[in-house]
Image (spheres, rainbow, N blue to C red):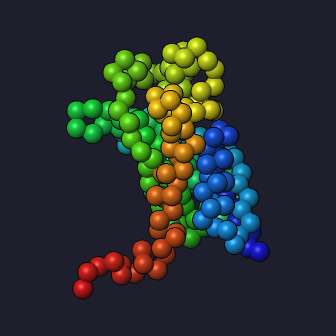
Amino acid sequence: MKRVRVAVGTKNPIKITAVREVFDDLFKDEKTEVLGILVDSAVPIQPFGEEVITGAVNRALKSLKSGNADYGIGIEGGVFPLGNKWYNLGFVAIVDKKGTIGTGTSGWFECPEPILRKLKSGEELGTVMDRLTGRRGTKREEGAVGIFTRKKVTRKEFYKHGLYMALIPFLNDRLWKEGVFAIQ
């Protein structure tokens, strides 16, 4: 059985579990080893707009190198503008040893204005949600998306969607690189 080493640029157990579940699901013929590695995203603790993408890519590249892995994965939660609103999302970047990079996102949900104001003042979403719920560590549990959806969509499921999307180039290597999707 082939062994695949996956390094995730975080120590957050929710993100690590999401990666493990997606790789186990898609690569059933391989033994997957998933490592959480603390890396610096080089973006603010609460990223906005393009910083979300930059943070995920930085985490993927740094974890690939630090973990001596086959794949490096960066998952960056942040807030992204669309139209005149701001949305919370998880951006995912996956890089392999050959330098192929796949990117994807989780679903998006509108960021409530009172929370957006807190984020723009420099607070992290997890901290804001902890204060609103009177709990600690919500970002290591169901996350804001789980709180807002009454646990119908948990943070782990939210990130799994983005991981599947970011894996598309790896799952369709020949089709992706050779451009056979072009209509003749």
Closer to us: 13 or 103: 13
The answer to whether 87 is drawn above or below residue 25 in the figure is above
Quarter residue 29 falls in: bottom right
Question: Whole-percent x and y of residue 20?
Answer: 66, 54
> Is residue 55 in view?
no
Which residue sits at x=43%, y=40%?
89
For this view, does 151 lie left or right of residue 32?
A: left
Which residue sits at x=26%, y=81%?
183
Question: Whole-percent x and y of residue 8?
Answer: 63, 50
Q: Residue furthest right?
A: 1
For this view, does 39 lie left or right of residue 127?
A: right
Question: Whole-percent x and y of residue 150?
Answer: 50, 29
Q: Residue furthest bottom?
A: 184
Question: Whole-percent x and y of residue 154?
Answer: 54, 38
The answer to whether 85 is drawn above or below residue 34 in the figure is above
Which residue sits at x=71%, y=62%?
32
> Is residue 18 in view?
yes
The answer to whether 60 is drawn above or below residue 77 in the figure is below
Closer to us: 44 or 24: 24
Quarter residue 109 falls in: top left
For this view, does 110 lie left or right of residue 67?
A: left
Closer to us: 124 or 27: 27
Quarter residue 85 falls in: top left
Q: Where is the C terminus found, in terms of image quarters? A: bottom left
Say how many tags the image has.
Answer: 0
Q: Where is the N terminus found, in terms of image quarters? A: bottom right
Which residue sits at x=64%, y=54%?
21
